Amino acid sequence: MTGHAAADLTSGGARLPGDGVASPLSGKDLAASIRAEVAAMVAQGPAPKLAIVTATADEASAWYVRSLARAAGKVGITCEVVDLGPHADAATITATLVALGTDPGTHGVILQTPLPAGVSAREVALAIEPARDVDGANPVSLGRLATGLPAYAPATAEAVVALLDHHGIALAGKEVVVVGRSTVVGKPLAHLLLDRDATVTVCHSRTVNLPAVTRRADILVVAVGRAGLVTADHVAPGAVVIDVGTHPTADGGLVGDVDAGSVAAVAGALSPVPGGVGPVTTALLLRHTLDAARA
Ligand SMILES: NC(=O)c1ccc[n+]([C@@H]2O[C@H](COP(=O)([O-])OP(=O)(O)OC[C@H]3O[C@@H](n4cnc5c(N)ncnc54)[C@H](OP(=O)(O)O)[C@@H]3O)[C@@H](O)[C@H]2O)c1
């Protein structure tokens, strides 16, 4: 599908068959415009500060934190990485989060995962001050989101909706299937989609006959953490597919949870990895930090 099916999805009609070349749903332009907006706002007042708490020796996590800190610096947001080391216990992590929740110089707080073995991310995330919980990690934020109270949504979940909006893909009345039910992506995303009047199905590892369920989707969002799990067989012709997955490859590249090669021939539109959900997620974390500072 190219422009024809995309137009059809925006107007609320039935899907059109894919024409063998899915439109790429890039997140780069949207991310750039969010970053520019944030930079312009930051320039008008005191610099917001984001604190990222880490407690891991994981290299992929360290790479992500460095890139987030760089992105923050570029828009004028100060970023402090509080590295507690891979052996930090729950009490130390909790005390650090509590202190950052009252520190007058800090506005946004992110708890980076993975955490040391035996430390429950959900338990310690309860110590993040909800008004500074810019990646929606505190279970209180998820509860607020689910009940329609103001809260920061996890940036990745919000990025999926922002990407669909940016490309003019309507959600109301659409059959949306989300594969993955994590508290970081799948569950908050289901709430955001329900708020937009989509009809939402959430799949997981115990879903029976996954391809039969995912083929019902007008819009299929994949966040399973398994490279290339979703193939052409899972996708209805002309459907919109959003790939949340990120997997580093041996040659330094990145692939998603969707087998892009086969799915692009069936789907109407497909978000690329890299360059789809990822840059929008980072940009939204910066926007949330600005919002927290100005609140
Ligand atoms: N682009 C970004 O900004 C960004 C941000 C966060 C995460 N990610 C990526 O998104 C992906 C998902 O992350 P996550 O944190 O949500 O992962 P997660 O916590 O591991 O959750 C994975 C979910 O997928 C389900 N699942 C696993 N195998 C399945 C299968 N064969 N069939 C159906 N469902 C299956 C699991 O089901 P059960 O619940 O039954 O176990 C679980 O609900 C990862 O690749 C991650 O790197 C990207």
Image (cartoon, rainbow, N blue to C red):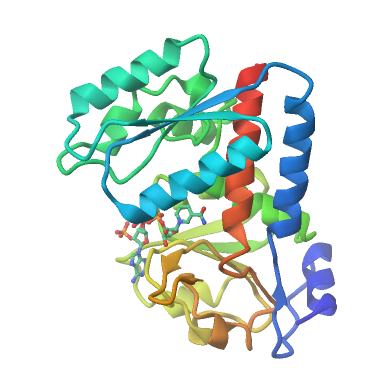
Residue in the image at 59% along x and 70% along y: 217
Q: Residue at x 73, y 34 (%)?
A: 38
**Ligand 1 found in image quarter:** bottom left
- Note whether 130 is above or below 166 in the view shown: above
Q: Name the quadrant containing residue 74.
A: top right
Q: Position of residue 232 (x, y in %)?
A: 53, 86
Q: Name the quadrant of the C terminus.
A: top right
Q: Is residue 33 left or right of residue 186?
A: right
The answer to whether one can see residue 198 in this image is yes
> Percent from the top left, x then y, of residue 275?
62, 63
The reply, left or right, for residue 193 in relation to residue 205 is: right
Q: Can you say whether 161 is above or below 242 in the image?
A: above
Whether residue 192 can be seen here: no
Q: Say which of 288 and 229 sits in front.
A: 288
In percent of the image, x 79 and y 77: which residue is there? 5
Question: x%, y% of residue 225?
Answer: 38, 64
Placement of 115 over or under 246, stated as above or below: above
Of the pair 173 and 120, the residue shown nearer to us: 120
Give the camera-side residue of 275 and 193. Answer: 275
Residue 118 placed where, x, y %?
Answer: 15, 40
Give the vertical position of 242 relative to 64 (above or below). below
Residue at (47, 64) in percent of width and height: 245
219 relative position to 252: left or right:
right
In terms of image quadrants, where is residue 276? Answer: bottom right
